[in-house]
Image (tube, helix red, strand yellow):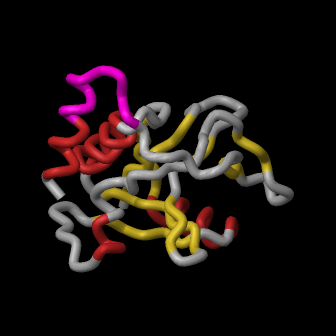
Amino acid sequence: MSVHVLLFDSGSDQEGIHSLELNGRTVVLLFEDRDDAERYAGLLEAQDCPGPTVELLDREEMELFCIQAGYEARFVPSGFLPESAEDRLFIAPPERNMDVANWQDSDDGTNLVAGPMAEPIESADPELEAFRRQLEGLL
């Protein structure tokens, strides 16, 4: 079975995968539905995060990668409905994101994000800001 994941700098030497930090765990989202992955990527872009690309990869390979990297793979099925605040992060990114400008390689070869948490970004473009608030309102 294939899943959709979000990659930054796809195909480059600085390629990295989108992940969430939840209670000390690094979680990688594996979307069943491409539209869900693209919507999530769009929400990241609306927060002025560099736009990730949606890539179709083998689920078993992704789960093995996550185990080897010490990450938790979280499958997001089509039509997923959140039941908790943590579950909401599987359909919409948090308001605060790590800086993805400078990837750093760890000793095990996996890419990690460098930089402190950014404050929620307010866009200078009123139209973009209105769109972001509208998307947040859907939650």
Which residue does the image show at 22% across and 72% down from the upper left?
82
Q: Quadrant of residue 101?
A: top right
Q: Position of residue 75 (x, y in %)?
A: 37, 68
Q: Position of residue 116 (x, y in %)?
A: 65, 50
Quadrant occupied by the C terminus: bottom left
Quadrant occupied by the N terminus: bottom left
Q: Nearer the viewer, residue 88 or 105?
A: 88
Q: Nearer the viewer, residue 16 or 24?
A: 24
Above-or-below relation of 48 to 63? above
Q: Secondary structure of the magenta portion, mostly?
A: helix
Which residue does the image show at 26% across and 43% down from the upper left?
39
Asked if the magenta segment contains residue 129, the reply would be yes
Q: Which residues are magenta?
A: 122-131
Residue 134 located left or right of residue 93 = left
Q: Nearer the viewer, residue 84 or 116?
A: 116
Which residue does the image show at 59% across and 66% down from the upper left?
66
Residue 112 located left or right of residue 124 = right
Asked if the magenta segment contains residue 124, the reply would be yes
Above-or-below relation of 71 to 113? below
Q: Position of residue 6 (x, y in %)?
A: 45, 45
Residue 3 located left or right of residue 8 = left
Q: Quadrant of residue 44?
A: top left
Above-or-below relation of 132 to 72? above
Which residue does the image show at 62% across and 72% down from the upper left?
67
